[in-house]
């Protein structure tokens, strides 16, 4: 945790907040902060600054926040990912959020196991927790919009053209010869399939929606590795 993220509910006045639980434990046990110390803090979907601890009790602490700057600029990227295994889902959300992605869709695909859709890790509570973990890691405050779509064709054919309108449209595909571009200077919509990629019929659906299939090379990467590698290459 490189930043303590505060919610509006934490505030007792305009600049005084009280926190407990996980954040209390991190501040007191990991940072070893005491009354009078200053730590990095920010407000959910707001600014970033420093917080001075004014009181530390057995399970709660009080801090006075000073906002000093805006959060980092978001990446101009809409990310579409075939729903990964539940334990990988958390890493993808936290990792993409820490890199500045602010819009993510998890979608169905032929190689996505049906059981993944019943995982408790798809709950709104867990998705929010993982996004917050990514923000705390990167010293960011702006939560991403994360949505799920269970019907591949309906999403790609009916929704995606409007979602990706005016953007560079790319779909990762290990069995193409077109190399993923570098240092892109325009907004991008990027689709990433399961390990092994989307099947050919799915790639064809993306291509009909205006997407270009690109590759990082002949190696098949894990989903969370592919997400990080592709984002780093593009931006």
Image: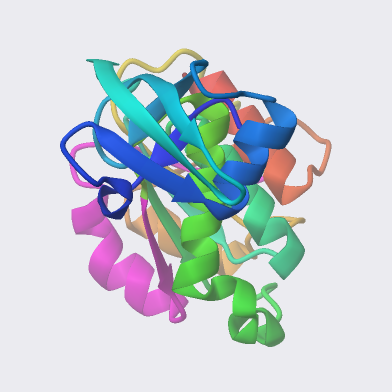
x, y (%) of residue 227? 61, 40
Q: Please give left or right for residue 9 compared with residue 221 in the image.
A: left
Camera-nearest residue between 111 and 173: 111
- Residue 137 appears in which quarter of the rendering? top right
Residue 109 showing in the rendered view:
no
Front in this rendered view, residue 212 or 10: 10
Identify the residue shown where x is 39% and y is 31%: 63
73 inside magenta stretch: no
Quarter holding the N terminus is: top right
Query: Which residue lies at the image location 72% right of the left edge and 57% below the top edge?
Result: 88
Q: At x 18% / y 41%, what residue is drawn?
A: 13
Picture quadrant of residue 46: top left
What's drawn in magenta, residue-wise?
Answer: 145-174
Q: How many marks?
A: 0
**Of 130 and 100, the residue lying toward us:** 130
Q: Nearer the viewer, residue 153 or 145?
A: 145
Horizontal side of 213 relative to 58 (left or right) equals left
Q: How is the image coloured?
A: rainbow
The residue at 45%/47% (across/down) is 19
> Picture coordinates of residue 86 (x, y %)?
70, 68
Q: Is residue 184 visible?
A: yes
Residue furthest to the right in view is 219
* Picture coordinates of residue 175, whole percent (x, y): 71, 45
Is 233 drawn above or below residue 124 in the view shown? above
Eyeballing the image, is 95 above or below 59? above
């Amino acid at each position: 945790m490189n930043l303590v993220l505060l919610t509006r509910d934490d505030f007792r006045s305009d600049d005084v907040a009280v926190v407990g639980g996980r954040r209390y434990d991190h501040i007191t046990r990991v940072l070893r902060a005491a009354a009078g110390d200053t730590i990095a803090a920010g407000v959910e979907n707001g600014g970033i600054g420093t917080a001075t601890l004014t009181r530390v009790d057995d399970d709660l602490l009080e801090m006075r926040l000073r906002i000093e700057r805006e959060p980092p600029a978001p990446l101009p990227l809409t990310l579409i990912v075939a729903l990964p295994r539940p334990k990988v889902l958390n890493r993808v959300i936290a990792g993409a959020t820490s890199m500045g992605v602010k819009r993510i869709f998890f979608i169905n695909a032929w190689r996505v196991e049906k059981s993944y859709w019943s995982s408790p890790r798809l709950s709104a509570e867990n998705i929010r927790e993982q996004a917050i973990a990514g923000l705390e890691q990167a010293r960011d405050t702006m939560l991403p919009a994360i949505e799920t779509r269970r019907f591949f064709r309906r999403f790609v054919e009916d929704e995606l053209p409007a979602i990706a309108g005016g953007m560079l449209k790319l779909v990762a595909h290990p069995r193409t010869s077109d190399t993923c571009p570098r240092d892109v200077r325009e907004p991008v919509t990027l689709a990433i399939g399961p390990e092994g990629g989307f099947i050919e019929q799915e790639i064809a659906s993306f291509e009909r929606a205006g997407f270009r299939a690109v590759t990082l090379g002949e190696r098949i990467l894990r989903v969370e590795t592919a997400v990080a590698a592709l984002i780093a290459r593009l931006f």
